[in-house]
């Protein structure tokens, strides 16, 4: 039995994910498949469950059907001890409107917090790829007496404008300034090429959270957003602290993947995160059995490679058949089929993709059930690809769900 009560977990999973189109054309961003077996939401839920935090509400909103179904069919915990992971759709409890921001999403669901009556509330995002033991962050939160603790990570200063940037006081833990997506991010003292930014993961003292949310709700100029409004408000009150993700230690981690965290908010970052998985010594290791990534893949037979089938530096999901094709530096999900003479290089294939005879695919993401006909090519003529598909700024070709690709 745990010696101290765990916080109630709230996972924010309502984002549209516009920058991931067309992968989010038919699903919420946290439901986007990742890594051959998982969906993005599985990473945060795995971290919470591995840390013993097993009372979790997942707040959903946009195109949530596949996300709701995944949570209810995969993340079923024993109710004997009161454990649960439940999707909570937008219910318009405070009026006929959807969530106007992440802070408003929590305010509209404050009945969940009142029902559980926790002393502390953990609020994590649902669309990042990483391993973390949130209990270590929670311990610091308790020890510091913070009103809110913000998980923080170092990024290149040139990239920090995409995040909430943190400036620390001399004690190295108190947040003295918080800048939401600044055009000129401040560097870190002693290391001006790096900035300390928010990971979008927070732990609140329940009374401090309630006071801040109610105050923010009365401000007609507010965006009602945690990063843009609540954290700056609590920073001004002197109750915001930072938790340095670099201090987090997860069982079974390697020196190479320690501290790995990726915001996969764009097609290029989503693609690059997949490429991090496939090297001989991966930058992010899916095969850490001491801190497992949990999901519920379909019941399928093992992978089959024919006499001429080749898969190198690749991940291949269950039920896939490499029938004379070649897969190089790629992630193939379950139930993928590569036919005779097909070649796929540096690509991401989602479930039930079919690659025809002598077809060639390079630097591409193929969504579920895409069929590439015999002899067709993707990724070799970007001008032609732009006429038919989405091409990212980094030159990654994205083919939407169920599309048939002709020669």
Image (cartoon, rainbow, N blue to C red):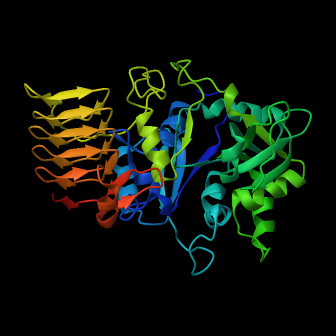
Q: Residue at x 48, y 26 (%)?
A: 291
Image spot of residue 53 (x, y percent): 56, 37
Q: Quadrant of residue 66?
A: bottom left
Q: Quadrant of the N terminus?
A: top right
Side (left or right) of 136 relative to 12: right
Q: Which residue appears farthest toward the right when viewing the image? A: 170
Identify which residue, 11 or 252, lies in the foreground: 252
Q: Quadrant of the C terminus?
A: bottom left
Side (left or right) of 80 relative to 330: right
Q: Residue at x 59, y 30 (%)?
A: 133
| Above or below 286: residue 124 | below
Image spot of residue 165 (x, y percent): 75, 48
| Above or below 286: residue 399 | below
Identify which residue, 381 or 30, lies in the foreground: 381
Identify which residue, 31 or 210, lies in the foreground: 31
Image spot of residue 137 (x, y percent): 69, 34
Side (left or right) of 403 relative to 204: left
| Above or below 82: residue 191 | above
Image spot of residue 339 (x, y percent): 11, 41
Q: Residue at x 71, y 39 (%)?
A: 152
Q: Which residue appears farthest toward the bottom when viewing the image? A: 96
Task: Tell me if I can see residue 20 in this picture.
Answer: yes
Side (left or right) of 98 relative to 150: left
Q: Residue at x 52, y 68 (%)?
A: 90
């Amino acid at each position: 039995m745990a010696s101290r009560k765990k916080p109630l977990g709230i996972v924010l999973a309502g984002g549209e994910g516009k920058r991931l189109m067309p992968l989010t054309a038919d699903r919420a961003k946290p439901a986007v498949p990742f890594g051959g077996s998982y969906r993005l939401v599985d990473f945060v839920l795995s971290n919470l469950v591995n840390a013993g935090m097993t009372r979790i509400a997942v707040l959903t909103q946009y195109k949530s059907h596949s996300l709701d179904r995944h949570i209810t069919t995969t993340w079923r915990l024993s109710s004997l001890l009161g454990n649960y992971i439940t999707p909570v759709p937008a219910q318009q409890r405070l009026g006929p409107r959807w969530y106007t921001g992440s802070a408003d999403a929590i305010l509209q669901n404050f009945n969940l917090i009142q029902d559980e009556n926790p002393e502390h509330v953990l609020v994590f995002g649902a669309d990042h790829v990483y391993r973390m033991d949130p209990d270590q962050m929670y311990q610091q939160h308790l020890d510091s007496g913070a009103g809110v603790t913000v998980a923080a990570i170092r990024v290149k200063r040139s990239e920090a404008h995409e995040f909430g940037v943190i400036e620390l006081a001399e004690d190295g833990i108190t947040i003295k300034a918080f800048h939401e997506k600044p055009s000129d991010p401040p560097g870190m003292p002693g290391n001006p090429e790096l900035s300390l930014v928010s990971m979008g993961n927070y732990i609140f003292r329940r009374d401090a959270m309630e006071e801040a949310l109610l105050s923010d709700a009365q401000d007609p100029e507010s965006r009602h957003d945690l990063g843009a409004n609540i954290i700056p408000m609590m920073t001004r009150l002197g109750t915001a602290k930072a938790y340095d993700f670099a201090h987090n230690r997860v069982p079974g981690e390697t020196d190479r993947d320690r501290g790995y965290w990726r915001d996969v908010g764009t097609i290029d970052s989503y693609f690059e995160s997949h490429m991090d998985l496939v090297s001989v010594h991966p930058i992010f290791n899916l095969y850490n059995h001491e801190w497992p990534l949990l999901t519920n893949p379909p019941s399928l037979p093992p992978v089959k490679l024919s006499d001429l089938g080749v898969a190198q530096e690749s991940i291949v999901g269950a039920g896939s058949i490499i029938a004379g094709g070649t897969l190089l530096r790629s992630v193939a999900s379950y139930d993928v089929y590569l036919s005779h003479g097909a070649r796929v290089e540096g690509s991401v294939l989602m479930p039930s993709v079919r690659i025809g005879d002598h077809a060639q695919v390079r630097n591409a993401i193929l969504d579920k059930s895409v069929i590439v006909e015999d002899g067709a090519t993707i990724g070799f003529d970007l001008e032609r690809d732009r006429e038919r598909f989405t091409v990212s700024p980094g030159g990654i070709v994205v083919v939407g769900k169920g599309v048939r690709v002709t020669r």
